Amino acid sequence: MKPITVRGVRSVDIELNEPGRAAEFYANTWNLTEIERSGESIWFRGTASHHHILAIHRSRGPAALRRITFDAADRDIVDALHKKVVESGCAAESPHEISVPGEGYGFGFADVENRNLAIVCDARDHSAPADVSDRPRKIAHININAAQIEKTNRFFTEVLGFRCVDHSGPLYFLHCDNSDHSSIVTGQTGKPTLNHVSFEMPDLESCMRGGGRMRDAGYPIEWGPGRHGAGNNVFCYFAGPEEFPIEYTAEVLQIDDGYEFHGPDYWKWPPGRLDRWGITPPHTARWKRIQDMVFFTSGSYRLSCSPF
């Protein structure tokens, strides 16, 4: 029996005041590939198969996260998850054929803290994906902040089928129907905002070289390099254009259903240590500020509509 859950994050839609400037950054510095442009919206792919992993749109206010889109195995899973979302009391559109870039079949909805989410299958994906040094593969995970952490975690586990595989400090690591340690990370804050979007690089060397390329382009490392405990992934965090919080990561721990849950006591570091290696300095003041700065766009959760 197929698990009724998603297969990870397919893509993220963000809103920025200068999408053209941001597009130059994500193509020439962050190393994604532009595949489509319509008006002031631009779509980018990584080296994995997803049609796109990032879409940038014009903002009518501060930088914002418009939508997180999850990948599903097939239409049966999409329909089953839609039923569970509706039964939870959250607002959702009916599953339908999608006309926006990437196409496919799916639906948009708002979760328990009014985040715009979507679930999609049968998209117009790329064939024969292959790693390319220094280029991101896909979205590794998205770390979201929650004003009501228990309510948010229940929604992701009981409605969307995630499993909590680790709890480290204020963070909960949620695993779905793939081999990656976690695709969503949640943390308790005073409001439901974005902590960061993590892009997976093919190896440690690409992650480190990416950090150097960012510094050369005037984007200093805000936290890292280092290696996390939960997930065992290496990391470098940055403030992208308009201070949108992004991460390069690599060597994400691969797990299966036999992975054993560990709680905060297990992941507690000795005083002064912030990662496995013990070399990363503390977060910069800027990183502490921007990891709770970006809100989800308020407005329509529907895939076929502008949120304005």
Image (cartoon, rainbow, N blue to C red):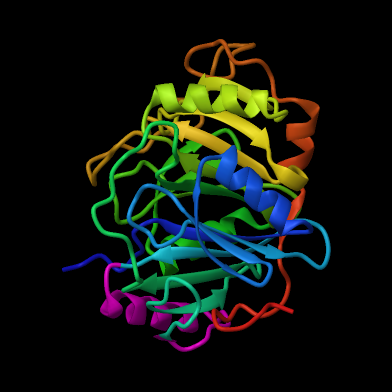
Residue 78 among those drawn in magenta:
yes
Q: Give the range drawn in magenta.
A: 73-96
Asked if residue 251 is positioned above or below residue 296 in the image, the reply reads: above
Q: Along the line of sight, which residue is nearer the eye, 62 or 256?
A: 62
Asked if residue 222 is positioned above or below residue 136 in the image, the reply reads: above
Q: Where is residue 105 in the image (x, y as percent from the top left)?
A: 37, 80
Q: Where is residue 58 in the image (x, y as percent from the top left)?
A: 73, 65
Say which residue appears at 66% left-offset and 23% top-offset.
Answer: 216
Say which residue appears at 50% left-offset and 22% top-offset.
Answer: 208
Q: Along the line of sight, which residue is nearer the eye, 105 or 113?
A: 105
Whether residue 265 is visible here, answered yes or no, is no
Residue 305 among those drawn in magenta:
no
Q: Name the outermost residue toward the right.
A: 61
Q: Name the outermost residue toward the left.
A: 1
In the image: residue 241, left or right of residue 257? right
Q: Where is residue 14 in the image (x, y as percent from the top left)?
A: 64, 59
Q: Along the line of sight, which residue is nearer the eye, 168 or 107?
A: 107
Whether residue 288 is visible here, answered yes or no, is yes
Say which residue appears at 32% left-offset and 56% top-offset.
Answer: 49
Say which residue appears at 43% left-offset and 64% top-offset.
Answer: 70
Q: Where is residue 165 in the image (x, y as percent from the top left)?
A: 39, 43
Q: Looking at the rendering, in which quadrant would you find the C terminus?
A: bottom right
Residue 42: quadrant of the picture: bottom right
Q: Along the line of sight, which residue is nearer the eye, 267 or 265?
A: 267
